[in-house]
Amino acid sequence: MTLRAQEDAVPEEAEVPTEKLHEAIQDELEHEGGRLLKQVALTTALLAACAAVAALEAGATINEALLLKTEATRLQAEASDQWAFYQAKGIKSAVAEASRTSWLAIEKPPPASYADLQARYAREQGDIKKMAEEKQRERDQKERDADVLIHRHHGYADAVALLQVSIALGAVSALSRSRRVWFGSVALGLAGLVMGLVSALR
């Protein structure tokens, strides 16, 4: 047989008897396992939706926590700048005091400008100190808020893990037609839901 004849002999489309397969599936669904499969499908779909919500919350909380940590780092830098400014004013005050002391050492009255400078630097140092301490308080609050969110994120992440395992068990129960495995899937799913709710309420 020539190559052309062989090509003509091959059917263009392979026909698969899908009608018989469809009927077999319908028959199986109507048997005792059909009800279990529907229950497994429903619970697995609900658990998948809950897992998606928990995953979104986990992502949102960690993003917000990272934003707060970044803000805390910026506030720490600003507080450090203020403390450096505070130190600079202290050095200027010490220089003014040293100059005033030099005048006193030669038994001459120091110019009044030295005392004025010292008073001004002390006043400025007080203002700078308040500002630096305020920045540090803000930084500490941002850090605390970020830590709460990170803790909440861990709760959501654990909930997602439990929900994913429960979905996998649901698939195993559907394949094995095991009601016990399905109960285990539902129990793990409920544990994941509780963990997610606790994290949301925290």
Image (cartoon, rainbow, N blue to C red):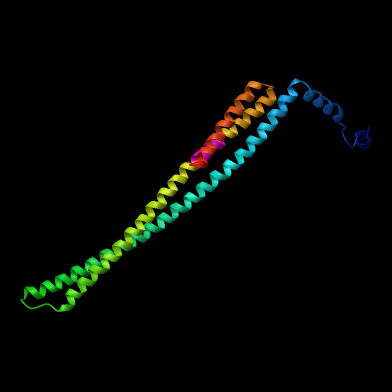
Is 82 above or below relative to 27? below
- The magenta region covers 154-160
Could you tell me which residue is drawn at 44 percent across and 52 percent down? 69
Is 88 above or below relative to 199? below
Q: Residue furthest left?
A: 107
| Residue 15 inside the magenta-drawn segment | no
Q: Is residue 184 left or right of residue 139?
A: right
Question: Across the whole image, how many numbered discs are drawn on residues?
Answer: 0
Where residue 13 sits, quadrant-wise, is top right
Q: Position of residue 41 (x, y in %)?
A: 70, 31
Where residue 17 sits, quadrant-wise, is top right
Could you tell me which residue is drawn at 93 percent across and 36 percent down? 8
Is 142 above or below relative to 153? below
Where residue 83 sits, quadrant-wise, is bottom left
Q: Position of residue 128 (x, y in %)?
A: 30, 65
Q: Is residue 91 left or right of residue 145?
A: left
Could you tell me which residue is drawn at 79 percent across and 23 percent down? 30
Q: Position of residue 4 (x, y in %)?
A: 93, 37
Is 195 above or below relative to 74? above
Which residue is nearer to you in this view: 141 or 20? 141
Which secondary structure class fits the magenta region best? Answer: helix
Could you tell me which residue is drawn at 49 percent across and 40 percent down? 154
Quadrant showing the N terminus: top right
Q: Position of residue 151 (x, y in %)?
A: 46, 42
